[in-house]
Amino acid sequence: MNPVNEQSNQMTDQQKRQPLFPGRAFISTVLDVVESKKTMSGALTGKYMQRATMAGLFVGIFFTAFFVIMGQASQNPADHGLILAGRVLAATTFGWALVLIYYTNSELLTSNMMVVTIGAYHKRLGWLASLRILVLCLLGNLAGALIVAVILRFSSIVSGPTLDQMLAAAATKTGYVSGGPMGFADLFVRGILCNFCINIAMLMVYNGKLSNDFTKCIIMVVAVFVFAFCGFEHSIADSALFLILGVFGRVNAWKAILVVLVAMLGNYIGGGILIGLNFATMNDERHFKA
């Protein structure tokens, strides 16, 4: 065959596939990330745990900032405008935690749910390897959040209106698991919506169409803003809150664990299934014939 004609045929095939599988760049990028995480969690386990711990630190610190802002804005219960403004500022501030996690190459459980699901679907990861990545990431995230909790125990940051806001948030979260089936369903749905927001942002960042760092930052901040403002449930943020209150002896441990587990399951559905598996199958061109 004439080399020019062969090249033309290849270009024609690519042109046919492009509108049919617009997420191919996203999948390709995620699969590269999968290879990196597989190596890090295997041969470089300690360094992988350090990255996961850093993510836990970011979540713990910025979630604390969320409650500090909320506490300051809520000192006058009659001033609803100030309370609303405080919630907007708090949710926006918390959004920068995801930006820092992304740009420092830290490892966050909720975004890894999407990554390992895509990797498993494309057989780049076995299910045991996927589970190993998630478990190590969870342990690192919890370690980072615990470090923040212990540090805060020796300060006056978590006191007054900040502590009041944290206790109110914890009471709302544990109230879901005390509310019977409907309470569990409410918590589960909030977990789904939370990680859908997180991972749709990561999809936009990974899809190769955004070259501007400012735009990437805005997308990540807005995604976190939506879940924080609406009261969706993030398993690592919840863990950080309960660990902080735990070192002050102000939390029911069993209810807290149950909240985190239900939120985590919801997070996996939202990020791993609705984004990860959904986009993996939607952009699977392996069996396509032009």
Image (cartoon, helix red, strand yellow):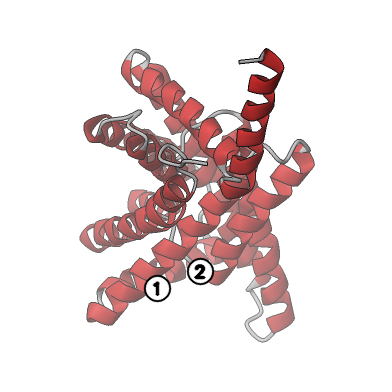
Up the image or down, 264 lies above or below 128; here it is: below
Given residues 28 and 100, the one toward you in this image is: 28
Kind of residue indicated by mark 2: Gly
Circle 1: is it few (<14), some (14-19), or many (20+) Cα within 10 Å?
few
Q: Which residue is drawn at 51% across and 45% down?
A: 59
Q: Residue furthest front?
A: 1
Given residues 265 and 167, the one toward you in this image is: 265
Q: Residue at x 39, y 49 (%)?
A: 277
Q: Residue at x 66, y 39 (%)?
A: 15
The quarter of the displayed image where residue 85 is located: bottom right
Q: Nearer the viewer, mark 1 or mark 2?
A: 2
Counting from the top left corner in percent of width and height, residue 24 is at 56, 39
- Tag of residue 172: 1
Q: Which residue lies furthest to the bottom in this view?
A: 78
- Tag of residue 231: 2
Number of labelled discs?
2
- Horizontal relation, residue 257 to residue 114: left or right: left
Counting from the top left corner in percent of width and height, residue 16 is at 62, 42
The quarter of the displayed image where residue 100 is located: top right
Quadrant that contains the N terminus: top right
Is the Cβ of the residue at disc 1 closer than 8 Å to that at disc 2?
yes
- Tag of residue 126: none
Up the image or down, 28 lies above or below 194; here it is: above
Is residue 171 visible in this depiction of the protein? no
- Horizontal relation, residue 99 to residue 252: left or right: right
Up the image or down, 97 lies above or below 6; here it is: below
**Mark 2 element type:** loop
Counting from the top left corner in percent of width and height, residue 52 is at 43, 32
Q: How many angstroms separate mark 1 from mark 2 (CA)?
A: 10 Å
Kind of residue indicated by mark 1: Thr
**Mark 1 element type:** helix
